[in-house]
Image (spheres, rainbow, N blue to C red):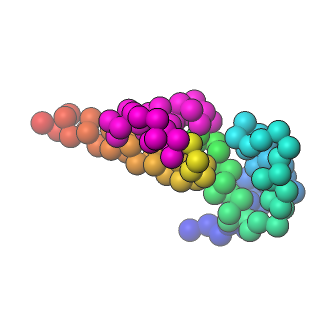
Amino acid sequence: MVSPLKKMQEQFGSKEKLVASVMEALKPYVSKNAEELKNIKAQSTAKLLKLYESAKKITEAGGKEAVIEKLTTASQKANAAVREKLAKLPLNELAARYNTIKAAAVNKVRGKKAE
């Protein structure tokens, strides 16, 4: 297991570069005034790495709206209240839920192949 500091040094070189990467990755998901990012430099390296990975996963999946759509489709509860609740979740929670349905889909396919 690699420590967060070591991982940060290997991937980004310095905390300043990590902060810049996190801010860039979060741009599509925060408001224009970026008040949410005001104290991001004070966050721990581990938290910044987790935030960066979550934002990257959400972006790779097609963005926040696409992930919310996939989650509501997977849960078969595609009503406005569920979508609104999912939209308010932090990115790391949204990414975790997306990973869960993604893993379930993979396991379902593997289960069918084994039969």
Q: Is residue 96 left or right of residue 40?
A: left
Please state if 18 lies on the left or on the right of 60 as rendered.
Answer: right
Q: Taking the image as drawn, is residue 59 in sight?
A: yes
Image position, residue 112 (x, y; %): 19, 35
In x, y percent, where is residue 114?
17, 38
Q: Quadrant of the N terminus?
A: bottom right
Q: Is residue 62 magenta?
A: yes
> Closer to the camera, 12 or 72?
72
Near-viewer residue (103 or 32): 32
The image position of residue 37, as x and y in percent, is 81, 53
**Residue 6 image position (x, y, % from top left):** 71, 66
Which residue occupies 73% across, 53% down?
11
Give above or below for 104 relative to 6.
above
Position of 32 with respect to 65 (left or right) is right
Residue toward you, 11 or 22: 22
The answer to whether residue 54 is left or right of residue 82 is right
* 54 up-or-down from 29: above or below: below
Which stretch did the figure color magenta?
59-86
Look at 51% across and 45% down and name the residue there. Answer: 86
Query: Residue extending furthest front?
Result: 81
User: Image quadrant for the C terminus?
Assistant: top left
Q: Residue at x 33, y 44 (%)?
A: 104
Residue 42: in magenta span? no
Residue shown at the point (85%, 56%) measured from the top left: 38
Task: Kindly indicate the quadrant of the structure image that contains residue 41.
Answer: bottom right
The answer to whether residue 115 is above or below residue 22 is: above
